[in-house]
Image (tube, rainbow, N blue to C red):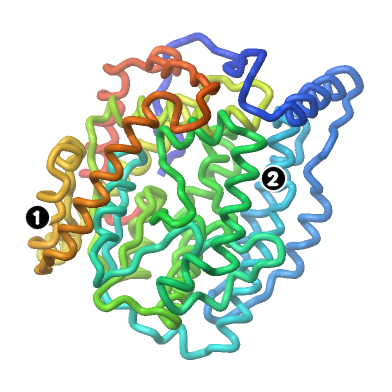
Amino acid sequence: MSTQVCPDPLPKGRVHDVRCAPYKGYSKPLLFLNWLGRTSLNRAGFVIFPIPRDKLLAKLSTLLESPFLGDSSPAKRGWVILITILADKNLGLSTAGRLWHRNLHVFMDERNTLVRYLDDNPEIPSIDIGKPIIVTGVHRTGSTLLQRLLARDPACRSTTAIDSFAGPGVKLLPPVTSRKDHFESPRAKAWERSVKEWERNAPEHRWTTQKYHRFIPAEFEEDILFLGMHGVMSALSLLFGELSPYTQWLMHEKEQAPSFLLLKRYIQALHHSWAPKSHWVLKAPHYALHVSSLSDTFPDARVVICNRDPVDTVLSNCRYWMSDLRHLVDSLDLHAVGRSVLHQCLVKVERLTRFRTHLRRTDPHRERDMFFDVDFDELTTSPIDVVRKLYAHYGMTVSEEFVSAMEAYLNEDEVLRKRENVNGGGPEWLVLEDPRPLADFGLTPEFIREAWAAAEKRGRGGSGTV
């Protein structure tokens, strides 16, 4: 498939320096370091706190091989590309952005921890995790809300941030063995310290992010965090652009297929220690890029696709990723963000459409049994009804305990959203900037709808893989 999914020409014009000084996004020490970093680079070509390229590349040689995880070469290729790009002083990373990514070796250490755990417990790869419900689709289409509703079923288990983070002095494995241990584990305490540090050093980024995607360590969270062990950092691909080598690697089916095996092994390890009564709920919009690999790795999965109006989807993505990326760079080109966002959305739409079209032609019963579509507007207005329809589609029963848990979550969610609509729920002094209009990202509704329809048309005319 051609990488040039987003057709030319895009509307012209560029927007720079969306982080206008004085920027309240950082603590005073980080503001000073950012200023010092810009000054030293612009005047002397000197980078403070550079990405330790050679150290990180040398670390790759310590990655352990495992027959349970398959070939590590794709992961190593991705890491080499990512580290090389991040270490380029012309990328424009801020001092804070460099500090944020200096410790990428942690993900490599976590991968080695998983390899050792599998070696010590060779029965894990043969564990049957049943028929997971996997929620995916384009970003910003309601997948987080749906995952957190589905995860309220007391018979299921879903992933949280705590499952995926080790931190200094804290081991990722072995997994916890009960819900109580889960929230009182050293890993949970490590996450709490990490979030406190985030709030202290980058309060505006923390609370802007919270406004778009509520991040609480104990809350259910998408399991793409595990894929950091494979080198998957999807946000960075939006920063680098749709034609960068890293984005190409991230979107390459064969390069990413091993990441799904890694995901499965990690879920099996969690299951080995604490199994749900019924099923797993997994979620990540990233999976829509590689639905073929997802299907190959989880052939019994029940895949839920979240859908939303294309223009609303793209605009919400642009605003979210702008808020997430702006703290990493000294200046951010909003038109480049818009282009990268649209490109990634279109690839997901085309690949999902292509796979499902092929399946309808070759095995229509499997396509019907495997997939369920959720509409964003219906999900946000009648969420429990949507869950009931989803369970009915898959022949599952919604218990009264499950309904009560969803109602409690929705009531709590409504209270939090009212508070977060002001400033993300952050401190009173924090005033977040108004959301940017679509034009600031160099896009128009007509252009988005035309490109979206073209992606669906290409998908309907193709084979089962991209």
Q: Is residue 106 above or below residue 343?
A: below
With 21 as the anchor, is 129 left or right in this view?
left
Out of 36 and 374, give the one closest to the viewer.
36
Judged from the image, the secondary structure of the residue bearing numbered disc 2 is helix
Which quadrant, please, contains the N terminus? top left
Q: Position of residue 263 (x, y in %)?
A: 46, 67
Mark 2, residue position: 101
Choose the circle earlier in sequence order: 1 or 2. 2
Q: Which residue does the image show at 33% across and 34% down from the upper left?
A: 417
- Helix, strand or loop status at disc 1: helix
Q: Residue furthest right?
A: 44
The spot of residue 85 in percent (x, y) is: 69, 40
> Between residues 214 and 234, which one lies in front from this camera angle?
214
Pick whichever, 364 or 24, lies toward us.
24
From this viewpoint, is residue 58 visible?
A: yes
Give me the residue at 50% from left, 69% from top.
262
Q: Dot 1, crowdedness within 10 Å: few (<14), some or many (≥20)?
A: some
| Residue 427 horizontal/vertical position (percent) | 52, 29
Residue type at numbered disc 1? Lys
Q: Is residue 300 visible?
A: no
The disc label shown at residue 72, or none:
none
Front residue (pair 412, 38): 412
Q: Which residue is mark 1?
A: 389
Give the CA distance from mark 1 to mark 2.
42 Å
The vertical placement of 85 against 301, above or below, is above
| Percent of width and height locating residue 409 | 27, 50
Structural crowding at the residue carrying mark 2, measured as other residues with C-alpha within 10 Å and reported as few (<14), some (14–19) or many (≥20): some
Q: Residue at x 33, y 47 (%)?
A: 144
The residue positioned farthest toward the top in the image shown? 13
The answer to whether residue 428 is left or right of residue 127 is right
